[in-house]
Amino acid sequence: MLSFFLRRLATFIPTFLGVTLVAFMFIRIIPGDPILLMAGERGMTDERYAELMARFGYDQPLLTQYFNYLTGIFRGDLGESFVTRKPVWDEFFTLFPATVELSLCAIFLAVIIGVPSGIAAAIHRGKFWDQALMSTALTGYSMPIFWWALLLIIFFSGILGWTPVSGRLSLMFYFENVTGFMLIDSLLSGQKGAFGSAVQHLILPTIVLATIPLAVIARQTRSAMLEVLGEDYIRTARAKGLSVFRVNGLHALRNAMIPVITVIGLSTGTLLGGAILTETIFSWPGIGKWMIESISRRDYTVIQGGLLLIATVVMLVNLVVDLLYGLINPKIRHHG
Amino acid sequence: MALLEVVGLTVEFKTANGQFRAVDAIDLTVDTGDIVAIVGESGSGKSVSMLALMGLLPWTATITAERMVFNGHNLAGLSARERRTIIGRDMAMIFQEPMSSLNPCFTVGFQIRESLKTHLNLSRRERQHRAVELLDQVGLPEPEKRLAAFPHQLSGGMNQRVMIAMAIACQPKLLIADEPTTALDVTIQAQILELLVELQRNSDMALVLITHDMGVVAETAQRVSVQYAGQKVEEQPVLPLFDAPAHPYTSALLAALPERSSGRHLASIAGVVPGQFDRPAGCLFSPRCEHVQPLCHEQVPSQTQRDGASVLCHFPLDRQGRPTHARQDHDSQNQNQNSQTDVNQINGGMQ
Ligand SMILES: Nc1ncnc2c1ncn2[C@@H]1O[C@H](COP(=O)(O)OP(=O)(O)OP(=O)(O)O)[C@@H](O)[C@H]1O
Ligand code: SF4
Ligand SMILES: [Mg+2]
């Protein structure tokens, strides 16, 4: 198991370096150079230009620049935003918890509904429940997200008035940012109603963000279960006189979960990379919204740093998924 | 009363092209301590008939039988829940592919203890103890260590031993082994068969051994049921069967045995078992039978007796291996008429 872990870790390092290279090149291949971009419409004198080139190290050879960039990364220095003048690193870590909170809620919802639906569909293959569940999943999968979000907002916020339209918390509350997770911080604050408000704000974005992963997980669970249910060892399990629940829920599910875990992990990775549409629609202060805003402001250091951080998060999640995969699949654990 | 008594077992599958009869009115009686072999080529319904008894067929299968009684239970009338208390305990089955028949996600020990836990009232420690004992019994060295292994860490032969250990865990009265050695190396095949026979001998367990290997039959079985295209075409004790097969199909199977072939070429039966779309009229074996007569194409034969053998043929072979109509021809001038009356007599005798 340890060697499996080390081997997976070893593949992580070159991938990470590759991503840094892409992020490094990104700012150098865009038309114009970053200093001129920083100056914007106003322009600048030649002396000022040379001074800035030297200050940011753009006058050095490319290899030296890359080396400086790398050492910067390991010191936690990703540069400053052109717009806010705040370190990219700080901005990221202020916003990231909001994305994590929303993503985890969405994945949780997708798993607790998607997996049982997939199992039910597989067991009732070809019958009413299968068709009902799978056509719902297909609808969810193919629905345009913004349209779906608008429908929910119109119905739940507009007509019923149950949920707020945007943000993470009602303005009535204010408390210290301890963990950055509103669900936890609101409880820690001890303010009455704060937790309820946080939950209310989470509901719609969670549903919207969970829709596609839910559909994918349900379909993947169904097909994995169908495949597994036809295996010889399921016949063996039934021949042992085991209950239907044990055959489906233990012998079949345990094997079917192997591909499903991968899908869950990959979806988590994608969501943690920032849900641009959902965060924008619900004004959710996460990194998806941050990225889209920095793109529209041409805040290149933020885009560069943000890309690197998001890619790293996704890669880390994939690494964890790989390790989990090894943990639940004995064949991988021993040979893979 | 027999341990297992099956009369007229028929299994039909719902397929895209209508009903397909995979098992056609099979009879099978097994007594405590018996070893019965079921032989026949691929597709003759051996597995399906046994899976029907175990209740392991998919929902597309329709099972009917005049009688299907095991150990006093009417298998046809059992609910799924009641059946689950019998299968895996009193009636167990092992399969052809040991590598894929064990769950890759659980250790061997888990899978054996699970059988014990399902049917017997043992404590955790007793189950562990019994699992070690079982692996020892099926001849796996270092049983404690093996219990912690996953199936992919063991060889095919070892996995089949594990399957056997799991099947005999609750000391079943009947063990059905569906081609237990087909997927294994030749040397391992002999060991596994030996193990099965030994386990059977040391208990009063009955063994139904499905195989298409006549050599295996000769070495292990007491009684043989020969199946062809879903029908039982012959049943005899093993010695007389090898000595004097009554059905042309059995005779052809025996002639195909390497040690029996005369000359350099291995005799084999030309043609294949008819499937859903090429079922002939009359006798199902008629397209391949070397003793076929015009009548065989027209009329479905019925079960007859020939000194101790039950056989499904218009013209069963006599002890000299000659079809009955040949003898009749010898006695009579009018061949056609005679074989016709001969058959009528046989049929009449049955009713
Ligand atoms: N689930 C099923 N649906 C439809 N037809 C089936 C099904 N299972 C088996 N059959 C058909 O029933 C017939 C008998 O199959 P069976 O597996 O019993 O043969 P067998 O005698 O065990 O052969 P083998 O020696 O290859 O194991 C075959 O023609 C097979 O295609
Ligand atoms: S009935 Fe006719 S075709 Fe069929 S096995 Fe007997 S002799 Fe051959
Ligand atoms: Mg078979």
Image (cartoon, helix red, strand yellow):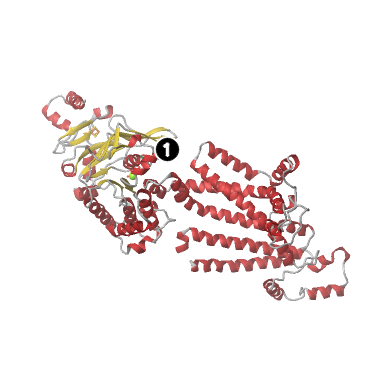
Instruction: Evaluate whether residue A60 shows in this view.
Output: yes
Residue at left offset 12%, top offset 30%: B330
Residue B173 location (% of width, % of height):
27, 46
Residue at left offset 26%, top offset 46%: B207
Label 1 residue near ligand 1, CB within 8 Å:
no
Q: Quadrant of ligand 3?
A: top left
- B324 or B292: nearer the viewer: B324
When the figure is inspected, residue B174 is found, relative to residue B247, above or below; the finding is below
Amino acid carrying mark 1 in the image: Trp
Residue at left offset 49%, top offset 68%: A2
**Label 1, on which residue?**
B59
Give neighbour class at mark 1: few <14, some 14-19, many 20+ (Cα, 10 Å). Answer: few
- Residue B338, by quadrant, is top left
- Is A150 on the left or on the right of A114, as rendered? right
When the figure is inspected, residue A63 is found, relative to residue B47, above or below; the finding is below
Instruction: Evaluate whether residue B211 shows in this view.
Output: no
- Is B71 on the left or on the right of A282, as rendered? left
Chain letter of disc 1 in the image:
B
Residue A117 location (% of width, % of height):
55, 44
- A290 or B67: nearer the viewer: B67
- Residue A46, by quadrant, is bottom right
- Residue B322, by quadrant, is top left
- Is B6 on the left or on the right of B242, as rendered? right
**What secondary structure is found at the residue carrying circle 1?**
loop
